[in-house]
Amino acid sequence: MIIDVHAHVYARPLIPKANGLTFMSAEQQVQRMDEKGIDKAVILPLNSADGPAERQSMGEVLSICEAHPGRFIPFCEIDPRRHDWHTVDDFLWGLEVYQRAGFVGFGELTCRLPFDDPKLMALFGACEKIGFPVTFHTSPPEKPTYGVIDTLFLPRFERVLQAFPELVFFGHSGSFWSEISGDLSAAEKEGYPKGPITPGGTIPRLLRQYPGLNCDISAGSGFNALTRDLEFTWGFLHEFQDRVLLGLDATDVELDFQHIEWLQQAHADGHITIEVLEKLLWRNADRLIGLELGG
Ligand SMILES: [Zn+2]
């Protein structure tokens, strides 16, 4: 079994990215999943005004799931800046509608608000109450990009972790994964830093301190963090074997991320056990999203 917790899938993608290619259609995504042996993929709608893609409705996401039974797991997304929702109860009301329609999580959260903005705190309170895991993309305030705003060492995110101890987070993006190393500088935060990982990184510290935090290894950002210092990685994957989830985040047909092949090779070479491999490839996602595929 393999579950990809980070996919962006459209019924009919139209607007091309800077490279001239669109995000993947459902048919292209299913073909990619079949090639890689992926049983199920989480669809993360990009629905905030700042997102890097066409916005999509939750109805579109459900239609894709229904057209490909058993292949997709729907997460919902709400831009928390909508003018008429302010409280936990406001957001909870909307999330309950989505939950009844079949949604099981929230993301990808990309809105350009500080992590502890009152609107986001209300949204997080609602996600905690309803039991939806939250996949987020974070980036620093000075960058003209998308993602929830936080600075070096993720101080605002830590306040959120303290405020919502029962909320499950799937952390993602370059500015999240660069925090794995203790020697990170503000200048390198939004990049893909190379070289040895030094002790004292924010991600290991937050993982040890806050049980709700988990890590989505998707895209170049997660892959770079895992492959830049292999001796560190084997220890990290052992210590946090219950907190790391496979994702790919392939945003067009030419991207061919090698996360699955790399993890399987790491197992074949004796660096991670079969138990750890299965947790990363699907058991953690199954448990944290509450899919109950593993019984
Ligand atoms: Zn993404």
Image (cartoon, rainbow, N blue to C red):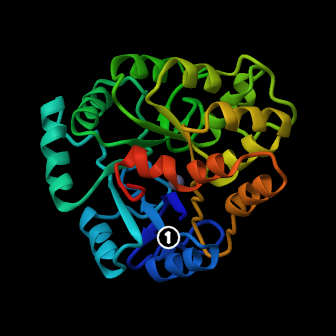
Residue position marked by numbered label 1 in the rendering: 39
Vertical comparison of 158 with 135: above or below: above
Give the left or right position of residue 188, taking residue 179 as reference. Answer: right
Q: Is residue 65 left or right of residue 13?
A: left
The residue lying at 15 percent from left, 56 percent from top is 100
Give how far across and how far down residue 294 sits, in percent.
42, 56
Mark 1 crowd level (few <14, some 14–19, many ≥20, 10 Å Cα): some
* Secondary structure of the residue carrying numbered label 1: loop
- Give the image location of residue 180, x and y in percent: 69, 29
Q: Residue at x 71, y 49 (%)?
A: 223
Q: Is residue 204 left or right of residue 133?
A: right
- Locate the C terminus and report the quarter of the image it occupies: bottom left
Q: Position of residue 175 (x, y in %)?
A: 62, 35
User: Is residue 35 left or right of 58 when viewed as pictured?
Assistant: right
- Note whether 145 is above or below 70 in the view shown: above
Q: Is residue 108 visible?
A: no
- The front one of 224 and 193 is 224
Q: Is mark 1 within 8 Å of ligand 1?
A: no
Q: Quadrant of residue 231?
A: top right
Residue 164: tell me if it is visible: yes
* Viewer-side residue, 87 vs 69: 69
Pick the residue in front: 190 or 145.
190
Query: Type of residue at label 1?
Result: Asp
Q: How many marks?
A: 1
Residue shown at the point (51%, 44%) measured from the top left: 146
On the image, the x and y values in percent for residue 271 come to 80, 45
Compared with residue 42, is residue 168 higher up or lower down, i.e. above or below? above
